[in-house]
Amino acid sequence: MNIPIAKPDIGKDEIQAVTETMKSGWVTQGKKVEEFEQSFAQYCGVKHGVAVNTGTAALHIALAALDIKEGDEVITTPLSCVATTNPILYLNAKPVFADVDPLTLNIDPTLIEKRITHRTRAMLPVHLFGHPVDLDPLMEVAEKHGLYVVEDAAESHGAKYKDKTVGSFGDVSCFSFYADKHITTIEGGMALTNDSELADKMRLLRSFGMHKDKKFFHPILGYNYKMPDINASIGLVQLQKLDNYIAKRRKNAVYLNKKLSDLNLKLPCEEKYAYNVYYVYHILADKESRKEKMVTKLENHGIETRPLLSLIPAQPPYRKLKYNPNDCPKAQEAHKKGFYISISPQLSLEELDYIEAAVRKAAQ
């Protein structure tokens, strides 16, 4: 079999939606984008949505709208896609890494307060792999120290913390609709907020800083991060499927966890406070050498694998800035021992059994 990490579920409804948008004569940012913004914001229980062309752009305009600037510090996780922290550097601010909870692999809220200085302006927690961060203690620290919270929910569409949808807790939250996410617009992202002034500022920032009522008047320096109506039309169809996608991912994860529970592997979890939407199926071996052997064997069986995203402090641009991956030993250990495979809602029972047998054989 051939089991890729992800395969977008693009069908006749998405194709028809794109065709209708193409025929409408308006393909760039327009009414479809507005409709998608409203629909996705409502799904997440938030007032305002600002659609952009990538999840990275969403994080960039969120931080810029909060006036994060040179010399400011933003506390975040060392284990994520590098897109989480790059926008902090774009603004000449400084990412400050707090280590992860070894069970969920999310930022450990108990370590955040130790990282706060007089320069700290915000926290940027990531709901990694679809599992929510433990938000109550994190929000308490933010309130105590007067810090902004920007949720990176790029991998967690529809996830819940204590029955409330992630993305509805922070000052701003950011999502990605890349091709491998729970729902896709092919490329795209969105920033959500309940603050109308922040929403207006993010809309300015995504469109050259141009005033909404005065063409070619630019009161602030902005970017070109607009989402086209073509992409939004795909997102509107995908959003109708999201709950079904999540249900299938959760069912697949439960099935594999039960089948593989007797092995000496750390499998995805779901804490009592969480409703996990399982972006991928991550596995941690007991040692790095076993992980490497498992990855080789799984790849030989046609099962695509990926590392646990990036250990960000170890990336060359961050090493040049004098970051040391040894400062976050739990994240470093997880990155050495971990990898992930598909948990796609499109996986058949036959494919799930094939994955189970291959993982079992690879772990021997």
Image (cartoon, grey):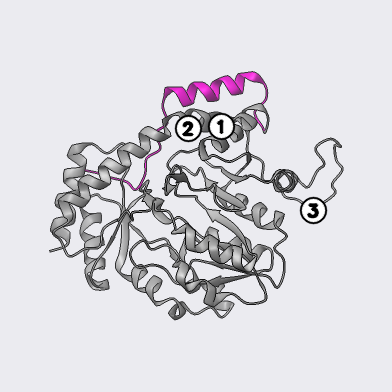
In the rendered structure, the answer to whether residue 254 lies left or right of residue 126 reads left
Residue 295 lies, with reference to residue 290, above or below; the image says above
How many numbered badges does the structure rendering display?
3
Q: Position of residue 244 (x, y in %)?
A: 36, 33
Are discs 2 and 1 less than 8 Å apart at CB? yes
In the rendered structure, the answer to whether residue 261 lies left or right of residue 228 reads left
Q: Position of residue 327 (x, y in %)?
A: 46, 80
Residue type at tag 3 = Leu
Residue 67 lies, with reference to residue 276, above or below; the image says below
Q: Quadrant of residue 147?
A: bottom right
Q: Position of residue 161 (x, y in %)?
A: 43, 50
Q: Earlier in the sequence, mark 2 or mark 3?
A: 3
Q: Position of residue 342 (x, y in %)?
A: 31, 48
CA gap between label 2 and label 1 equals: 8 Å
Name the residue tied to disc 2.
239
Viewer-proximal residue, 191 or 56? 191
Q: Quadrant of residue 333?
A: bottom left
Query: Magenta segment range?
Result: 1-28
Residue type at tag 2 = Leu
Name the residue tied to disc 1.
39
Q: Earlier in the sequence, mark 2 or mark 1?
A: 1
Q: Quadrant of residue 46?
A: top right
Q: Which residue is painted at 47% across and 45% down in the image? A: 164
Q: Earlier in the sequence, mark 3 or mark 1?
A: 1
Find out whether residue 8 is within the magenta segment: yes
